[in-house]
Image (cartoon, coloured by chain):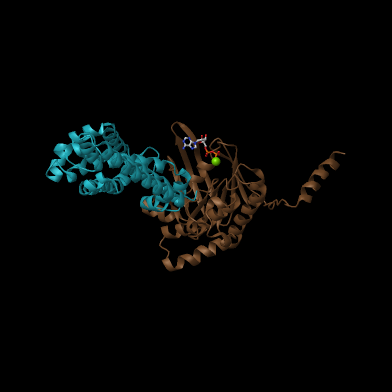
Amino acid sequence: MPEILVQYQAEIVRSIGETFVMVGVSILAAILVGLPVGTLLFLCRKGSVLENRFIFSTLNLLVNIIRSFPFLLLVVFLIPFTRIIIGTAIGTAAATVPLAIIAIAHYSRLVEQSLLDVPKGVIEAAISMGATVRQVIFKFLYVEARSGLVLGLTTSIISFISYSTIMGVVGGGGIGDFAIRYGYQQFKTELMMYMIIIMVIFVQLIQFTGTTIARRIDKR
Amino acid sequence: MIKLHQLSKKYEKFEAIQSVSLTVNKGEIHGIIGASGAGKSTLLRLMNLLEMPDAGEVEVDGQTLTKLKSRELRQARKSIGMIFQHFNLVANKTVYENVLVSLELSNVLRKERPGRVMECLRFVGLESLMEKYPAQLSGGQKQRVAIARALANKPKVLLCDEPTSSLDPNTTAEVLGVLENVNKSLGVTIVIVSHEMDVIKSICTKVTVMANGKVFETLATTPQGIQTIDNHPQYFVDQLKKDKMDHA
Ligand SMILES: Nc1ncnc2c1ncn2[C@@H]1O[C@H](COP(=O)(O)OP(=O)(O)O)[C@@H](O)[C@H]1O
Ligand SMILES: [Mg+2]
């Protein structure tokens, strides 16, 4: 192993851990909140099963607003909110708040898109069989859209890694922050290159895994 | 079995169905034919309230669907099967799972489900393809899976919207044969919408002709039998030679 990596081993391991926490929380938020929000966006649109103009417009507007913020500004803008939830606006835990929020907005849009790809006729068949909305979602929509949902999550996770790299501004740490502080600000270009290589490997692994799973579960 | 009473349905300002009354008797194979845009599909979709009427009543098997609460309507729909021109199977479910899902929606006991699924697949002659996915099947086979799925809950009525319109003549005959069998041996009342005269003539015992959102006429008919086309190459040769002779 290159000497410089050995020298900074402890910091590197800690940074990777911080990135995992930030990206992990983003993934959880995407699945636990983004998926339902995206599903609601789909179900509440005009002509859909739960058509509801108020819910649709409200969610649609919220998602658009969050996504149109330059992320750095969103982080700063959310500081008071973060302080209420976490008790502090500084550190890795605090960094997860804006990340979770952008994750929800990001993934919910992709969920909505995947569900729109499900043929209308399949939903109609489900309703003609007497399915409840819940059954339409779990036994038809998610089954039919599953590869799109996985690919969307893959794309999202890669964006989350990218978002997490700037969380140094609120002391969130992570590999990106490490690369900037040591590699860029202290002119250790070699160290920065290694950090970039680590990120590239992560992204490749995630993309490969996502694409493979999506292909395996797609029987269309 | 089905009674439509002065049904009307508008899309924006356009009156797709204009005060239609129609009775479908128990045991019938009732055809609905008419030009494209006549309102056939809309009328069929009103029979299980896939479309809500603006006025009028829909009665199926003694129940007035238009008066039911949504929970009761879902229950009623379980005894009204429906099949579609484009099959509408779940592409990510196997043939077996596609039929199973309709039992999962009802309260059929878990341990009774596999037997019931196989019974339905056997009825349409597809038990050997139970592990396949829809993408691996021919059009006729897909429609037979859809029929098996519609039969799983032992419906009293089967609504068919252009069930053979995306099939070639051979598979059309295959699907019509299954539908006739559903009617004859299971006693299911069938309503079949089609723009193809041959299809309507082959199996229907009563036919409603529609035009411009209204019933033009309803008449009793004698099923002419299903035209089967011999796949043997000599058949095609014979047909071609026959034409030549006719002209000579
Ligand atoms: N969802 C809809 N929105 C607007 N117009 C519709 C809709 N469904 C059907 N129509 C119109 O209603 C008329 C009847 O349609 P349809 O019942 O599908 O005819 P058919 O099945 O006889 O070809 C057509 O003119 C069609 O354009
Ligand atoms: Mg039609």
- Observer-nearest residue: A179 or B248? A179
Q: Position of residue B210 (x, y in %)?
A: 58, 40
Q: How many marks?
A: 0
Which quadrant would residue A72 be assigned to in this image?
A: top left
One can see residue B162 in this view: yes
Q: Position of residue B5 (x, y in %)?
A: 48, 45
Direction left: furthest residue: A87
Q: Residue at x 40, y 62 (%)?
A: B107
Rendered hue of chain B is brown
Q: Residue at x 47, y 58 (%)?
A: B97
Which quadrant would residue A77 be assigned to in this image?
A: top left
Q: Position of residue A122 (x, y in %)?
A: 46, 47
Q: Is residue A131 left or right of residue B126?
A: left
Q: Position of residue B225 (x, y in %)?
A: 69, 53
Q: Which chain can be seen in cyan?
A: A
Picture quarter with the C terminus of chain B? top right
Instruction: From this view, report whether residue B1 is shown above or below residue A184.
Output: below
Q: Is residue B129 left or right of residue B197?
A: left
- Observer-nearest residue: B245 or A193? A193
Direction bottom: furthest residue: B111
- Observer-nearest residue: A102 or A112? A102
One can see residue B25 in this view: no
